[in-house]
Image (tube, rainbow, N blue to C red):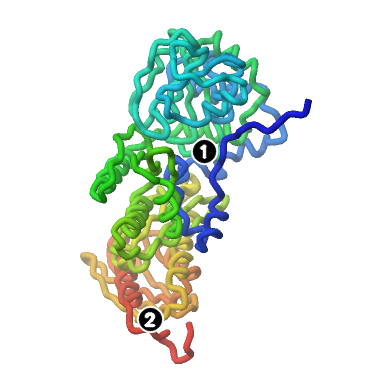
């Protein structure tokens, strides 16, 4: 008998397809429809994969024993109670086949993650409303797409508690494992490894044995397992996401919307015709997701969330849309960096690469230049800060070069002197379109001169800096502030001409 295709989970279009549809650069598209972390985690760089890549020609005969042991230790369980899978979805589908093939499945709440229904379809099961009559009960806690935190019922059937967003709620139901429940977790959300596709099931040793016996061998790749192990080895900090969730909720309320209280990294906004608002936001590059009765938006970082709020104001209040930030990434064997830059801006700056002193220096430069900058990522600081500092300045320069475009209407030249206690720095900048650096910093804290040279190469500017003093920290800080203030002058609007007798820079 020829098999027929089943109704399947529908993924949204790719960023490239959406960009083509609305006529935008793909880098201008911001996805608020995936409930993933706002940025790539610090551990996601080549160094974390080096050992796994060296052995990629081999199978892991131990079924990733170190990762399973780390997960077990993290939850104070025995390793025999941990099963690895390709995201939570592998277990959602597998458990439907194990416990409800041809039977019945219920979900809590009834309006919940659509994958439960597709798992039922694949298992030939029927979705029913009464959890006390179901062979298998999925509890999405916290719930997707509404963000609520439902109670866990006592049921006669097999109970599966999907805790994909538990980190954001600050509570869990792991104690239910002792009474026969299966708890699902994922590295896709709070850990920021959605693309790695690693999830795990926690259960009694007996149930874990049943689950593992139904899995394909090594459904998780060695590269993904290495990233997950690195993630567990790093303290997880979601405090920024929680602050942004609450701020975004307040700002949405100020726009006349009514987001539900959320225990997750997204907000659900009840409304009629959410599809209409999704379509209205798309031309601005903001991708959201409509559900029956409401709109779901992922919580990203402050700059992205402000972009969404600006787009909503443009749609709902007919206010002008501010110029969006430019987005760039620089991924090398030594560094993994992303940058968003708006020129001109309001001096809203966040720089975090782990190179503390130079993070602070670039913050000073960007603030005094009057641009909005968010630059974050990680580099191989274990070998020193050279690669990280060089690349952070190069990617900032690349973004600045594109933001300037043909440099029409800009003053072009800028000059500033900045004292810093006993130190004095003098900076002159020309948005020349030619990369020329003449830097004299005495004493140099270590990388200050090279940082400016790296910036000049990709920004295509001419930069002269002279700085002297007794304290190297003061000399460097005065230099970065002076360059920032000189840039602020050069970036000022001065008519509509390209300030060159050649007609172009």
Residue 194 x/y as whole percent: 51, 38
Q: Residues within 10 Å of mark 2 (few under 14, many from 20)?
A: some
Question: For this view, does 171 lie left or right of residue 206?
Answer: left
Q: Are marks 1 and 2 in contact (CB under 8 Å)?
A: no
**Who is closer to the viewer here, 402 or 148?**
148
The residue at the point 55 percent across, 30 percent down is 87
The residue at the point 56 percent across, 39 percent down is 10
* Image height of 20 relative to 246, above or below: below
Residue 110 x/y as whole percent: 42, 25
Please identify the residue farthest to the right as the structure is shown. Answer: 1
Q: Is residue 73 visible?
A: no
Residue 176 x/y as whole percent: 41, 13
Specify the quadrant of the image occupied by residue 361: bottom left
Q: Residue 270 got which mark?
A: none
Under circle 1, the secondary element is helix
Q: Is residue 275 visible?
A: yes
Question: For this view, does 258 lie left or right of residue 387?
Answer: left
Please identify the residue farthest to the bottom as the structure is shown. Answer: 501
* Image height of 224 relative to 65, above or below: below
Residue 270 x/y as whole percent: 34, 40
Under circle 2, the secondary element is loop
Q: Quadrant of the N terminus?
A: top right
The residue at the point 48 percent across, 78 percent down is 433
* Image height of 393 relative to 132, above or below: below
Q: Residues within 10 Å of mark 1 (few under 14, many from 20)?
A: some
* Image height of 51 relative to 82, above or below: below
Residue receiving disc 1: 194
Residue receiving disc 2: 409
């Amino acid at each position: 008998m020829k098999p027929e295709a089943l109704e399947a989970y529908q993924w949204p279009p790719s960023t490239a397809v959406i960009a083509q549809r609305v006529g935008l650069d793909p880098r201008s598209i911001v996805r608020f429809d995936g409930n993933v972390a706002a940025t790539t985690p610090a551990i996601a760089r080549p160094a974390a994969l080096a050992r796994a890549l060296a052995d990629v020609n081999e199978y892991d005969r131990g079924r990733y024993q170190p990762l399973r042991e780390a997960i077990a230790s993290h939850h104070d369980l025995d390793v025999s109670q941990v099963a690895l899978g390709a995201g939570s979805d592998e277990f959602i589908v597998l458990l439907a086949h194990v416990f409800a093939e041809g039977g019945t499945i219920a979900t809590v709440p009834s309006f919940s993650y659509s994958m439960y229904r597709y798992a039922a379809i694949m298992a030939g099961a029927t979705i029913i409303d009464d959890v006390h009559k179901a062979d298998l009960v999925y509890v999405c806690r916290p719930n997707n797409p509404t963000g609520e935190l439902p109670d866990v019922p006592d049921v006669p059937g097999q109970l599966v508690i999907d805790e994909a967003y538990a980190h954001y709620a600050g509570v869990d139901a792991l104690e239910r494992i002792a009474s026969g429940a299966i708890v699902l977790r994922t590295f896709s959300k709070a850990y920021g490894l959605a693309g790695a596709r690693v999830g795990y099931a926690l259960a009694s040793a007996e149930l874990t044995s049943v689950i593992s016996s139904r899995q394909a061998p090594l459904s998780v790749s060695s590269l993904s397992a290495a990233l997950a192990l690195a993630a567990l080895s790093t303290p997880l900090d979601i405090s920024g996401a929680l602050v942004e969730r609450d701020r975004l909720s307040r700002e949405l309320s100020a726009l006349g919307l009514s987001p539900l209280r959320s225990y997750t990294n997204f907000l659900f906004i009840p409304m009629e015709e959410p599809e209409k608002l999704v379509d209205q936001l798309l031309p601005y590059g903001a991708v959201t997701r409509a559900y029956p009765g409401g709109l779901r938006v992922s919580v990203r970082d402050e700059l992205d969330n402000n972009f969404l709020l600006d787009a909503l104001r443009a749609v709902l209040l007919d206010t002008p849309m501010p110029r969006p930030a430019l987005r760039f990434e620089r991924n090398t064997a030594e560094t993994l960096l992303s940058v968003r830059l708006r020129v001109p801006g309001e001096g809203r700056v966040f720089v975090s690469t782990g190179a503390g002193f130079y993070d602070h220096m670039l913050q000073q430069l960007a603030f005094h230049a009057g641009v909005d900058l968010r630059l974050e990522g990680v580099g191989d600081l274990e070998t020193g800060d050279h690669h990280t500092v060089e690349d952070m300045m190069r990617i900032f320069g690349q973004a600045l070069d594109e933001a300037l475009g043909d440099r029409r209407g800009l003053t072009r030249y800028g000059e500033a002197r900045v004292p810093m206690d006993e130190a004095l720095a003098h900076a002159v900048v020309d948005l020349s379109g030619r990369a020329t650096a003449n830097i004299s910093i005495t004493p140099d804290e270590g990388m200050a001169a090279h940082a400016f040279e790296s910036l000049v190469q990709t920004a295509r500017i001419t930069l002269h800096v002279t700085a002297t003093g007794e304290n190297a920290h003061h000399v460097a800080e005065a230099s970065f502030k002076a360059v920032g203030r000189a840039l602020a002058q050069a970036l000022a609007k001065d008519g509509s001409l390209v300030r060159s007798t050649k007609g172009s820079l």
